[in-house]
Image (tube, helix red, strand yellow):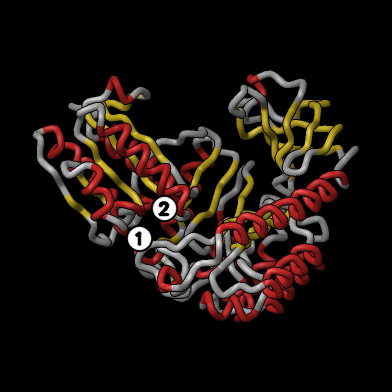
């Protein structure tokens, strides 16, 4: 049996893929190690959502290759850019994101010095696969894989293919087992949660409602990223209603990418700015203090100064709590890669302006929570050992008076300070004991 080192990057779906990889390897009798120098086999699960991220992957693949051990490159880079990986390490094995259930076979081939390339979209049901929880109180549930959109700038479809939703029964079974194991948070994740079920005759609202109806227990659900295209068509009211259960975090990640209808058309996003506004308005009518996250791409090749001003206008009108700001980078094999990019000076300046505006808005929004007191679950230990709690709105609260023994427990917190992207608080009392 082999000692395997696993390193993971990217979104929560990618993190769950890594957890499945580790679960499959353990079930097969292999051993996981935390130091690549102690490993017989090295595995890196890659992300290429942005050019800087791809550069990080290239750097890490080069570093791991110097250790002269069999290397397996999994994830989106393996599927979307296999030639890049092969140039970096011709002996590296490749596993696509929809082929991870064959990781044991690939590892066993690598032990024998054989290279494997497994990039097929295999018909697996990921919610049924064994996995290891990196955070023992958080269960990541991948409800679908792939995407329905054909955006000009994104490699997601190249890496993960078209939409394939997993059955509600299978998803509920995974959640039920997780809750019995003591998990306190359930993350519903995919490339686009609002597209869930379109291919199998259901939707995210029905899934969310069925989870809350059938699975009892002390847990919270975080709904991952959605987009206005699928919400606005038929299910907006249903999704809003499905958030009414007290176990659903009042947290909405709704991507927009641009405040310009012209740029949205050029990106082939399929919705308009007014669609985004409508979704936000309807959610806030039902949940006025809902935490809002969105995504903005700055400097798309067809974005002129007026388009950028429209994006600023949107952000200042909507006042999101968190914004993922990305400078446009041409991604290989996408339509936008054929466009003439804007000068780097313009990209950098627009990114700086947008970042400053978003930070100011985030701080103003955080200040509204000063003095708030209520329940929050301590669900994370930060890089420096600090405890991080989430309240009902999934607001991160750094605890300044807690011990690590409080991890996984629900406490009453008082917010004493605000920061742009987090709150500072202290524990006043403990509501739940550990399992």
Q: Secondary structure at mark 2?
A: loop
Is 422 located above or below residue 11 in the figure?
above
> Are discs 2 and 1 less than 8 Å apart at CB?
yes
What is the quadrant of residue 72 in the picture? top left
Q: Position of residue 251 (x, y in %)?
A: 69, 54
Quarter of the figure with the N terminus = top left
Picture residue at 26% right of the left edge, 24% below the top: 39
Is 367 located above or below residue 254 in the figure?
above
Picture residue at 64% right of the left edge, 58% below the top: 253
Q: In the displayed structure, does residue 306 sit left or right of residue 344?
A: right
Q: Position of residue 344 (x, y in %)?
A: 56, 58
Picture residue at 77% right of the left edge, 43% below the top: 420
- In the depicted view, which residue is nearer to us: 313 or 173? 313
Picture residue at 29% right of the left edge, 49% below the top: 100
Q: In the displayed structure, does residue 278 sit left or right of residue 366?
A: left
Q: Read off the residue under disc 2.
A: 48
Name the N-terminal-most of marks 2 and 1: 2
Q: Secondary structure at mark 1?
A: helix
- In the depicted view, which residue is nearer to us: 208 or 348? 348
Q: In the displayed structure, does residue 309 sit left or right of residue 31?
A: right
Is 20 located above or below residue 260 in the figure?
above
Q: Read off the residue under disc 1.
A: 159
Residue 32 in view, yes or no: yes
Is 239 located above or below residue 59 in the figure?
below
Callout 2 crowding tier (Cα within 10 Å): few <14, some 14–19, many ≥20: many
- In the depicted view, which residue is nearer to us: 157 or 342? 342
Callout 1 crowding tier (Cα within 10 Å): few <14, some 14–19, many ≥20: many
Determine the CA span between mark 2 and mark 1.
9 Å
Quarter of the figure with the C terminus = top right
Q: Position of residue 96 (x, y in %)?
A: 29, 54
What is the quadrant of residue 167 in the picture? bottom left
């Amino acid at each position: 049996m082999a000692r395997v080192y696993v390193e993971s990057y990217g979104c929560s779906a990618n993190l769950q893929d890594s957890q499945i990889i580790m679960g499959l390897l353990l079930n097969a009798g292999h051993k996981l190690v935390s130091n690549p120098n102690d490993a017989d086999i090295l595995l890196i699960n890659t992300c290429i959502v942005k050019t800087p991220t791809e550069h990080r992957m290239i750097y890490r693949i080069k570093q791991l290759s110097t250790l002269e051990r069999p290397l397996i490159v999994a994830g989106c880079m393996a599927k979307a850019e296999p030639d890049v990986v092969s140039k970096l390490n011709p002996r590296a094995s490749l596993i696509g994101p929809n082929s991870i259930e064959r990781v044991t076979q690939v590892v066993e081939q690598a032990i024998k010095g054989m290279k494997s390339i497994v990039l097929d979209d295999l018909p697996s049901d990921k919610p049924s696969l064994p996995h290891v929880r990196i955070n023992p109180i958080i269960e990541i549930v991948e409800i679908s894989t792939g995407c329905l959109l054909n955006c000009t700038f994104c490699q997601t479809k190249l890496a993960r293919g078209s939409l394939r939703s997993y059955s509600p029964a299978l998803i509920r079974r995974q959640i039920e087992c997780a809750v019995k194991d003591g998990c306190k948070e359930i993350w519903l994740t995919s490339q686009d949660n609002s597209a869930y079920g379109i291919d199998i005759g259901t939707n995210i609202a029905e899934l969310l409602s069925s989870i809350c109806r059938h699975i009892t227990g002390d847990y919270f659900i975080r709904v991952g990223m959605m987009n206005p295209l699928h919400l606005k068509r038929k299910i907006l009211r249903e999704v809003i209603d499905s958030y009414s259960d007290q176990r659903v975090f009042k947290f909405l990640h709704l991507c927009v990418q641009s405040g310009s209808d012209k740029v949205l058309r050029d990106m082939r996003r399929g919705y308009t700015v007014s669609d985004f506004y409508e979704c936000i308005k309807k959610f806030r009518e039902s949940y006025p203090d809902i935490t809002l996250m969105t995504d903005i791409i700055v400097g798309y090749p067809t974005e002129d100064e007026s388009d950028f001003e429209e994006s600023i206008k949107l952000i200042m009108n909507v006042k999101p709590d968190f914004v993922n700001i990305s400078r446009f980078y041409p991604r290989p094999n996408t339509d936008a890669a054929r466009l003439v990019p804007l000068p780097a000076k313009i990209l950098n300046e627009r990114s700086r302006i947008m970042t400053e505006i978003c930070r100011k808005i985030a701080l103003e929004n955080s200040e509204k929570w000063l003095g708030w007191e209520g329940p929050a679950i301590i669900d994370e230990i930060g890089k420096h050992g600090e405890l991080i709690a989430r309240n009902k709105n999934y607001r991160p609260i750094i605890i300044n008076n807690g011990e690590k023994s409080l991890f996984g427990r629900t406490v009453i917190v008082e917010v004493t300070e605000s920061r742009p992207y987090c709150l500072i608080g202290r524990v006043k009392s403990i509501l739940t004991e550990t399992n």
